[in-house]
Amino acid sequence: NFMLTQPHSVSESPGKTVTISCTRSSGSIASNYVQWFQQRPGSAPTTVIYEDDQRPSGVPDRFSGSIDRSSNSASLTISGLKTEDEADYSCQSFDSNNRVVFGGGTKLTVL
Amino acid sequence: QVQLQESGPGLVKPSETLSLTCTVSGGSISSHYWSWIRQPPGKGLEWIAYVYYRGPTNYNPSLKSRVTISVDTSKNQFSLNLTSVTAADTAVYYCARGGMYDSGPRYWGQGTLVTVSS
């Protein structure tokens, strides 16, 4: 099976743009959709991106998702950072048997 | 807007069976994929299993021998049974709804903490 590797933590200032990566260890990142979840401390996860680059209703367009075949990775980009964006972000995809695989999560600090 | 609510015991003894139910409101369970996901304290998300409303299931290989997931369309609920629990099964357990064609979570329940302890 494969792993999804994320940076343990990232930090950026309010108003700036941050990108969180999610690298697939084997197999093509384009083979299966990638989802992204936001989890604020003490709260349940919420979905901010599904099917690589789709935003659920209610998610600001400051959040965007993409995949890069050359680096075999997916990315979540948050522009115009706000303090309320401070949270853990996790990526998720599927293996060849449609089983769910999560990345380890990235702690975003907005300071 | 669909809403999901987990219910079940917050404390389970070692070697016993953990049983949780997810009640779905604001939509029918007779469509989409339905999943259980857990998060041990201070750790990342771990997928447990999913079920499609018509019955096909899929399980995390590391848990497969101990897990059963099922759907009750008459009650608009789906359930999780995890047998022979140990302290390593202590976690917040989330239920989630996926898409119509894939199980990637779209909507999440608020989660319920289950502690395994004697």
Image (cartoon, rainbow, N blue to C red):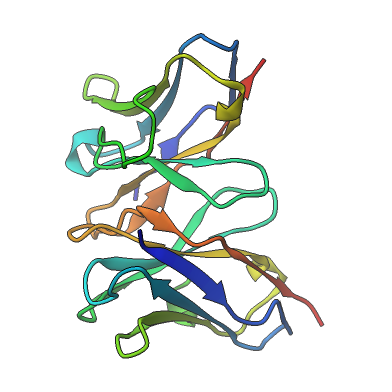
Between residue B90 and residue B111, name the one nearer to us: B111
Q: Residue B3 in the image: x percent, y percent?
A: 42, 64
In the depicted view, which residue is nearer to us: B13 or A70? Answer: B13
Location of residue A71 with respect to A15 vertically, above or below: below
* Side (left or right) of B91 relative to B50: right
| Image coordinates for residue A60, horizontal then vertical, percent | 38, 29
Up the image or down, B91 lies above or below B17; here it is above
Q: From where the camera sits, is residue B60 visible?
A: no
Please report the residue visible at 60 percent of the width from the left and 10 percent of the height from the top: A13
The answer to which image quadrant residue B11 occupies is: bottom right
* Residue occupying the point 58% across, 12% down: A14
Q: Is residue A10 left or right of residue A98?
A: right
Residue in front for this viewpoint, A76 or A98 = A76
Q: Quadrant of the N terminus of chain B?
A: bottom left
Residue B71 pos. (x, y %): 34, 83
Q: Is residue A11 visible?
A: yes
Q: Nearer the viewer, residue B91 or B78?
A: B78
Determine the image quadrant of residue A30. top left
Q: Is residue B59 left or right of residue A41?
A: left
Residue at image position (19%, 61%) is B100
Quadrant in which the C terminus of chain B is drawn:
bottom right
Q: Which residue does the image show at 30% across and 40% down from the upper left?
A: A34
Give the image location of residue A72, x and y in percent. 28, 27
Number of numbered tags placed on the structure image = 0
